[in-house]
Image (cartoon, rainbow, N blue to C red):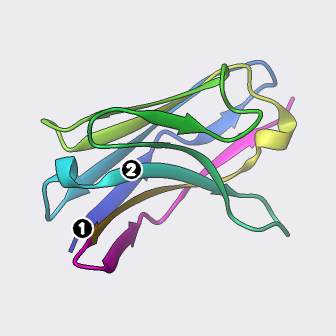
Amino acid sequence: QVQLVESGGGLVQPGGSLRLSCAASGSMLSIYVMAWYRQAPGKQRELVAHITSEGTTTYADGMKGRFTISRDNAKNTGNLQMNSLKPEDTAVYFCNVYRIRLGARYNYWGQGTQVTVSS
């Protein structure tokens, strides 16, 4: 079992920045792929970015260049740096980790942190 706790959300003006953090406990984060998702009101949850245990990153369209995903396996934490925020980035952001072992997917979610971009 992995427990994930996000932090760092809040209210920010358009063009501003926020840094989300995800703290993992219960297992070594290094064996998991880590991802950030977001869900805006009335919309489906969507992938923002993910990072492998080796540090390879992938971003959804529109996120690369503004968002940066990172992880510190030694500290069992991950981060999402968000710059040049837009009102359409308003959503609940979720930390996710998963691994696939012997054909089974082990998938864990945090409780989410609200990000609101508004003037």
Query: Nearest the camera: 72 or 8?
Result: 72
Q: As drawn, is 32 to the left or to the right of 48?
A: left
Quadrant for residue 52, please give it.
top left
Q: Is residue 103 above or below residue 115?
A: below
**Which label was assigned to residue 34?**
2
Q: Position of residue 61 (x, y in %)?
A: 75, 37
Identify residue type, mark 2: Met
Q: Which residue is mark 1?
A: 2
Residue at 87 percent of width and 29 percent of height: 119
Local SS, label 1: loop
Quadrant for residue 45, please give it.
bottom right
Q: Position of residue 96 (x, y in %)?
A: 43, 59
Identify residue type, mark 1: Val
Q: As drawn, is 98 to the left or to the right of 62?
A: left
Query: Nearest the camera: 47 or 54?
Result: 54
Q: Which residues are magenta?
A: 101-119
The chief SS type of the magenta part is strand
Quadrant where the image shows the N terminus? bottom left
Callout 1: few (<14), some (14-19), or many (20+) C-alpha neighbours within 10 Å?
A: some
Local SS, label 2: strand
Residue at 66 percent of width and 27 percent of height: 64
